[in-house]
Structure formats: structure tokens, C-alpha cells
Image (cartoon, rainbow, N blue to C red):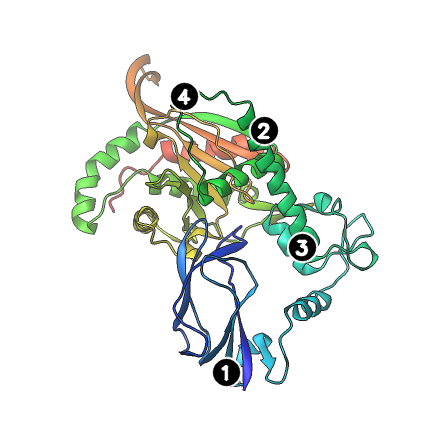
């Protein structure tokens, strides 16, 4: 017999912890492979965790409502020793589990020399992974004082540093509150956990990336007329509506193929150009918060496929039915300001991506058109597109060219196609 370590899994991009909603099994209970053992919640989704093995639950290490970091041991399951690829999670049956010892050994086994680091410090993969998840670059990591051997940064050091940053943020908010004038009858609303995390994410993005925004105006007249012509037939054929969102996604995908550097992320002094094109769709939730479900491999879908994928993700987001995999892996984000009646905006980049596109309201405007008989004024459907991008790697020429290419794809949309 052996003890299997059930770990808190990665629950989404940038998510480092989850809160236990309920245990569905108790110590001493039998558990079958793929049977749900507990339910957890993150700032983005609620989900179930299944057991990957058959066995008997020997120990539950956390209680309901406790918040558990990714990678921590949730439970120990007594199981048969032959577990194939799961062998790294098995403890010998005669080994008493000492969490401090296990953590220390795992960290020591992962120690490696930090390449391309101008300082003399070395970092374990565990520390580097925590830093990456919290948008701490190499320069910032080098400023942390380590308490380990020879000044090495331990897991506790970096977690304390992150907590201090959070505390500084909270103190900044508290300080702002002190100077906020309150009147009798003012309503005070405490941020919920999701709103606090969104706030931290947005503040970190502005701190990490120097934002630049470029704007173009796009003539959507032909596209609007095409959608008006086919939308009734599309709904009858596919039992769902066709909105402009999948059309925007299609144009963005084409432009990302033309300018692949915009489909990338930054890791220290390295640029990671993504192989896959995964488009995040910023979606407002009924409670006022925001979530970004992701269309995976959007470059492999036609317009019909993009329409179905978009509708599915947005509907499940609003019904709180997204899975952790639905919100991770995004390489570029689109946000639709026009749905709120806004004509233009300067969105904040969704880290660790390097650009985000905001779609403005489509509205009728008088415009000057060039014809073979001379210039004329006509009523056209116009829209502003605004692209915020990370000036560390996306310069104005690249950002502006990419944005113009998206606009060109929309203006030259094939209006003869039927879907």
C-alpha cells in the first residue's frame, strides 16, 4: 500500500489559490478513480476536483472555507502502489509525512542556476514559477532579500513579499479612503474577492507594461448590411444568433497571423511568440464583475465555428458554468465597449498578453466618399477600434499596422458568403 498526495491543481491562468467550498468525502471513506472528492472556488469559477486513483481517504489536510495555494497537498489517499504515471505523487507506506520536510526536499531537488541573470542569485523553479504567476519579473525578483542558505530566496520569502505588496496596495486603498469625503447617507460597498483580484490585476498590468493606445475608425456599412441580410436565416438554420463578436474575432485572427509578434508574451528579457491563437472575450457578469473566457485555437475555426464557440462561452460565463480550462491560455483579448453604448476607450492589457482590442459602438455618421463622379456625403455605419499594447515589445509602427490590418479585414469582409 502507498499514500497518494492529492494536490490542489492549477485552476486557471494567473490563479494561485482556491477556496474549499465543501468536502464530499470524509476521512476513512472509500474513493473511486474520477469520483468527486471536493468542490473549490477561485475568483473566476467554481469547480469540482476528482480523485485520480482508487483508495481510502486517510487524511484531509484542509477544512471547508480554507484558501489553499496551488500545489499544496489537499488529501492523502491510501492506494495500491502501482499507479503508473502518478508515481511522483506516491509516498512509501512506511514514510511518515512531514510537510516541512517534503516541501524542503522538493525545493532542494529543483534548485538550478538561473541563466541569463546578471546577478549572482540563483532561484529554484518553484520560486520562479510563483514569481511568474504573480507577474514578478527578474529585476524585481533580484530585489527580494532571501533568508535561505547563502541568501537564497525561499518559497516563504517570495510569498511574504507578495503578501507585503498586497498589504501596500490595501494600505494605499485605506489611505485613499481617509482622504475620501463621506457624507451622511453615503453607501459603502465592500469589494468582493473577485473584484479585489481584478483590481490587483489591473494595477499590476499598468505597473508592468508601459501602455500605448492607437485608434482607427472603421467603415462597417457593408458588414452591417450583410449581417442584417443573413441573420434570420442563420438563426433558423443553426438555432442561435450571429453577432458581430465572432466577426471581430475572425478579423483579429487574420491580423495576428500577419503580425505574430502581437500574439506573444514577455518573460523577463525574453519574448515568447505563441504558436496557438487563443482569443479571450471580456464578458460582463450579472454581478458587475468581469471574466475572460477563451476561444482555443481560433485560427482553426471558420466563421460558423467561431459563432458557436463565442455564443457557448459567453452564455456559460453569464450562467456561472465555465470550467477552469475555459479561462486560461489566452494569447490576445477583445473587449466590446459598444455593448454599453461607448464609442471609444483605452483598455488595460490582460497580463501576460501584450495587447488588447476595444470595439466601440457602431453608429450612423455622415461621411465623405470618393466616387468616379467626385466626392459625395453619405450616411455610413462607422466604428472606432482602439488597441492598447505593451510598448516594451510592440512599437507604434507594429501596433498601428496591426490595428489598421484588423480594420482592413472588417472593411473588406466577403459579403457574398453564406453561412
Of circles 3 and 1, the one toward us is: 1
Pointer 3 with pointer 1, Cβ within 8 A: no
Q: Earlier in the sequence, mark 4 or mark 2?
A: 2
Horizontally, residue 231 falls left or right of residue 182, namely left
Horizontally, residue 120 falls left or right of residue 56, namely right
The quadrant of the picture occupied by the N terminus is bottom right
Q: Earlier in the sequence, mark 4 or mark 1?
A: 1
Reply above or below: 248 against 301. Answer: above
Residue 170 visible from this viewpoint? yes
Q: At numbered mark 2, what does the secondary structure look like: helix, strand or loop?
A: helix
Horizontally, residue 370 falls left or right of residue 117, namely left
Q: CA distance from mark 1 to mark 2?
A: 53 Å
Tell me the residue at 34%/36% (across/down): 413
Tell me the residue at 18%/50% (across/down): 237
Residue 397 visible from this viewpoint? no
Circle on res. 79: 1
Q: Earlier in the sequence, mark 3 or mark 4?
A: 3
Of circles 1 and 2, the one toward us is: 2
Tell me the residue at 44%/51% (across/down): 327
Reply above or below: 92 against 269. Answer: below
Q: Earlier in the sequence, mark 1 or mark 2?
A: 1
Circle on res. 175: 2
Q: CA distance from mark 2 to mark 3?
A: 32 Å
Q: CA distance from mark 4 to mark 2?
A: 20 Å
Q: At numbered mark 1, what does the secondary structure look like: helix, strand or loop?
A: strand
Q: Position of residue 52 (x, y in %)?
A: 46, 74
Of circles 3 and 4, the one toward us is: 4
Callout 1: 10 Å neighbours few (<14), some, many (20+)? many
Q: Position of residue 245 (x, y in %)?
A: 34, 40
Amino acid at each position: 500500500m502507498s499514500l497518494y498526495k492529492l494536490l490542489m491543481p492549477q485552476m486557471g491562468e494567473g490563479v494561485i489559490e482556491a477556496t474549499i467550498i465543501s468536502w464530499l468525502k470524509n476521512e476513512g471513506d472509500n474513493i473511486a478513480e474520477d469520483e468527486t472528492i471536493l468542490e473549490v472556488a477561485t475568483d473566476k469559477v467554481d469547480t469540482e476536483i476528482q480523485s485520480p486513483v482508487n483508495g481510502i481517504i486517510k487524511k484531509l489536510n484542509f477544512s471547508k472555507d480554507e484558501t489553499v495555494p496551488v500545489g499544496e497537498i489537499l488529501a492523502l489517499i491510501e492506494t495500491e502502489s502501482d499507479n503508473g504515471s502518478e508515481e511522483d505523487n506516491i509516498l512509501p507506506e512506511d514514510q511518515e509525512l512531514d510537510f516541512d520536510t517534503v516541501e524542503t526536499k522538493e525545493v532542494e531537488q529543483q534548485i538550478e542556476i538561473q541563466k541569463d541573470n546578471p546577478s549572482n542569485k540563483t532561484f529554484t523553479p518553484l520560486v520562479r514559477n510563483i514569481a511568474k504567476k504573480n507577474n514578478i519579473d527578474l529585476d524585481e525578483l533580484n530585489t527580494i532579500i532571501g533568508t535561505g542558505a547563502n541568501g537564497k530566496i525561499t518559497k516563504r520569502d517570495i510569498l511574504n513579499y507578495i503578501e507585503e505588496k498586497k498589504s501596500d496596495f490595501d494600505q494605499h486603498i485605506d489611505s485613499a479612503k481617509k482622504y475620501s469625503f463621506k457624507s451622511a447617507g453615503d453607501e459603502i460597498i465592500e469589494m468582493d474577492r473577485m473584484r479585489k483580484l481584478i483590481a490587483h490585476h489591473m494595477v499590476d498590468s499598468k505597473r508592468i507594461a508601459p501602455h500605448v493606445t492607437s485608434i482607427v475608425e472603421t467603415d462597417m456599412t457593408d458588414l452591417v448590411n450583410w449581417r442584417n441580410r443573413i441573420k434570420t436565416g442563420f438563426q433558423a438554420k443553426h438555432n442561435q444568433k450571429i453577432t458581430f463578436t465572432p466577426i471581430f474575432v475572425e478579423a483579429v485572427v487574420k491580423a495576428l497571423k500577419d503580425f505574430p509578434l502581437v500574439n506573444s508574451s514577455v518573460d523577463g528579457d525574453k519574448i515568447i511568440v505563441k504558436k496557438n491563437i487563443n482569443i479571450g472575450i471580456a464578458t460582463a457578469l450579472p454581478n458587475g464583475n468581469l471574466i475572460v473566457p477563451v476561444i482555443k485555437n481560433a485560427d482553426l475555426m471558420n466563421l460558423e465555428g467561431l459563432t458557436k464557440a463565442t455564443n457557448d462561452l459567453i452564455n456559460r460565463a453569464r450562467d456561472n458554468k465555465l470550467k477552469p480550462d475555459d479561462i486560461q491560455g489566452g494569447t490576445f483579448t477583445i473587449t466590446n465597449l459598444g455593448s454599453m453604448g461607448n464609442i471609444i476607450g483605452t483598455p488595460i492589457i490582460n497580463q501576460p498578453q501584450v495587447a488588447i482590442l476595444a470595439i466601440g459602438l457602431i453608429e450612423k455618421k455622415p461621411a465623405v466618399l470618393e466616387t468616379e463622379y467626385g466626392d459625395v456625403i453619405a450616411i455610413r455605419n462607422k466604428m472606432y477600434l482602439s488597441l492598447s499594447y505593451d510598448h516594451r515589445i510592440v512599437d507604434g509602427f507594429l501596433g498601428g499596422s496591426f490595428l489598421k490590418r484588423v480594420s482592413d479585414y472588417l472593411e473588406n469582409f466577403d459579403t457574398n458568403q453564406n453561412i
